[in-house]
């Protein structure tokens, strides 16, 4: 788990946490803490997405499998901006499993 990302997001005023995950373990851990910062859990696994839909303050999102982490994060940020979850330039904490 990554307590550093949750701590940073809370204390630095991050708009969101982007969690790249396959299993959903990190978003589950984060959902147990009432941080007030939404966790956008990005996964390629449909089963993980379904489980994470039940987690408090976690918004799961299916993303395609990408060659590298940076491309996946760029894609996710673009989707979240399009849906009004983020604005260009918003500060986000990132976790990668």
Image (cartoon, rainbow, N blue to C red):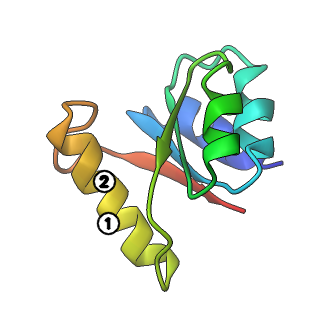
Count every numbered label the image shows and give the total. Answer: 2
Question: Mark 2 falls on what kind of element?
Answer: helix
Which residue is at 66% across, 37% downward?
Answer: 6
In the rendered structure, the answer to whether residue 72 lies left or right of residue 11 reads: left
Q: Is residue 3 visible?
A: no
Q: Does 28 sit above or below residue 93?
A: above
Q: Please give the label number shown on residue 62.
A: none
Residue at the farthest bottom position: 67
Q: In the rendered structure, are the residues bearing label 2 and label 1 in contact, judged by CB atoms less than 8 Å apart?
A: yes
Q: Is residue 41 visible?
A: yes
Residue at the farthest front position: 46
Question: Quarter of the image holding residue 16?
Answer: top left
Question: Mark 1 falls on what kind of element?
Answer: helix
Q: Position of residue 74 (x, y in %)?
A: 32, 66
Quarter of the rendering occupied by the C terminus: bottom right
Instruction: Give the CA distance from mark 2 to mark 1.
Output: 5 Å
Q: Please give the label number shown on residue 74.
A: 1
For disc 2, the marked residue is: 77
Q: Position of residue 95 (x, y in %)?
A: 62, 56
Q: Position of residue 47 (x, y in %)?
A: 69, 42
Query: Circle 2: is it few (<14), some (14-19), or many (20+) Cα within 10 Å?
Result: many
Q: Position of residue 57 (x, y in %)?
A: 57, 19
Q: Does 96 sit above or below residue 19?
A: below
Which residue is at 48% across, 85% downward?
Answer: 67
Which residue is at 50% across, 71% downward?
Answer: 65
Query: Circle 1: is it few (<14), some (14-19), or many (20+) Cα within 10 Å?
Result: few
Question: Quarter of the image holding residue 36?
Answer: top right
């Amino acid at each position: 788990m990554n307590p550093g990302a949750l701590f940073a997001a809370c204390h630095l005023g991050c708009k969101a946490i982007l969690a790249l995950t396959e299993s959903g373990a990190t978003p589950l851990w984060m959902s147990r803490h009432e941080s007030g910062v939404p966790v956008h859990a990005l996964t390629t696994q449909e089963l993980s997405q379904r489980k994470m839909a039940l987690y408090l303050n976690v918004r799961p999102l299916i993303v395609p499998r990408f060659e590298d982490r940076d491309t996946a994060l760029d894609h996710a940020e673009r989707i979240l901006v399009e849906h009004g979850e983020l604005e260009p330039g918003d500060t986000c904490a990132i976790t990668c499993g």
